[in-house]
Image (cartoon, rainbow, N blue to C red):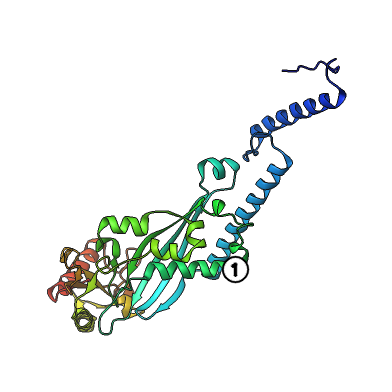
Amino acid sequence: MLILFGKSHPNKDDSTVNIVWQYLYTMRLSKLKRLTEDDEPLEPSGSNEGMLEIDKLRYASEKFEQTLKKYSREHLFWKKIQVPEGDIHLILMKELIPFTFVRYNEEKYLGDITLKIDFIPNMDPKPVIPLNILQISVENFIDDLVKINPDLLNKSIYPERLMNTYHLKFLNVTVFPANGIIHLRDFMDTPTYNLKLLSPNPFGDIMSSRSHLKNVYSLIPGDLPTFADNYTSSMEKLVHKAKHVYHALKKGTWKGHTYELDTPISWKSGVVIHQDRNDYNRTDKIIHSNFSASLNLGWEYVDGVKNSKEESVLPPEEREEFRNWLKKRFEHFGIGY
């Protein structure tokens, strides 16, 4: 190794000495930078070309994250996608980390892009969950991102290797048949659910090839549950019964006090149907109409005053006694309160 003490080596010309000095100076700055900054320089030499490439990658990463943020702003609650079987509400959640060369080159991870699906099926004649629900959701999501930022399709700006450091997956799929709620994880085979929904996939591969996207998120008959033929009619009858019991018990007296039940803002949420998960045969994968109903109301009013802890005219022990009495009256008719 050539060691310099302020004078040029007798066997080396000035240009060689300058080159060596420049190399040592660059390496020293490189080490200092590691101590003071989060970003790691391109190894081994930190050349201008390498640093320029890192800056391009960092810029692309930041622009991509801005694209995701704009998507979230444009679809503040959810993106509604209409399909023949009903409406898909697509919700974006993301957990991203700042770009550094180490995270890009060694860890190959810059964060998760997570999609959540709420599906509201048509009920006539019975609910149907479309087999292409995952494919449609991801395709629509990518199309929207490209509308916001058309350069995403330009691999010279957004290299596939960079985009693959973002991992795409689903949080869950929740189905809302009329007044009911079904979590798909309870009605799918666990290996299929884990592979198709929870397993993270490199986003660059998904974005760059529609055939690959459709293959990754394909579902076949038997992957998803189906509904019994009488599912819709049975639910309608139970909702009607709950409403009838509500109106019958809406007003009354208790120990000299008058009471009145609150009026629900919407009967869609006012009556909640609970699916019996134990009544599900994983062989035929049919969801039967075995469910119960409960009322989801605000506070009842006693003597015209809200029966909450803070405002009730009843002392605490009587307030609790009254609420238990009211619950038992509804339970007598098979309705929860």
Residue under numbered circle 1: 148
Is 107 placed left or right of 320 in the picture? Answer: right
Residue 263 at least partly seen: no
Q: Nearer the viewer, residue 198 or 172?
A: 198
Q: Say if 112 sits above or below 295 in the image.
A: above
Q: Quadrant of the N terminus?
A: top right
Q: Quadrant of the C terminus?
A: bottom left
Residue 116 at least partly seen: yes
* Residue at the far left in the pictured view: 332
- Whole-percent x and y of residue 95? 49, 53
Q: Nearer the viewer, residue 178 or 337?
A: 178
Q: Say if 29 sits above or below 230 in the image.
A: above
Q: Nearer the viewer, residue 58 or 336?
A: 58
- Whole-percent x and y of residue 272? 27, 73
Amino acid carrying label 1: it is Ile
As helix, strand or loop, the secondary structure at mark 1 comes to: helix
Q: Quadrant of residue 45?
A: top right
Query: Which residue is painted at 76% across and 28% down in the image?
Result: 25
Badge 1 density bin: few <14, some 14–19, many ≥20, Cα 10 Å: some
Q: Quadrant of residue 325?
A: bottom left
Is 51 placed left or right of 316 in the picture? Answer: right
Q: Say if 52 sits above or below 268 in the image.
A: above
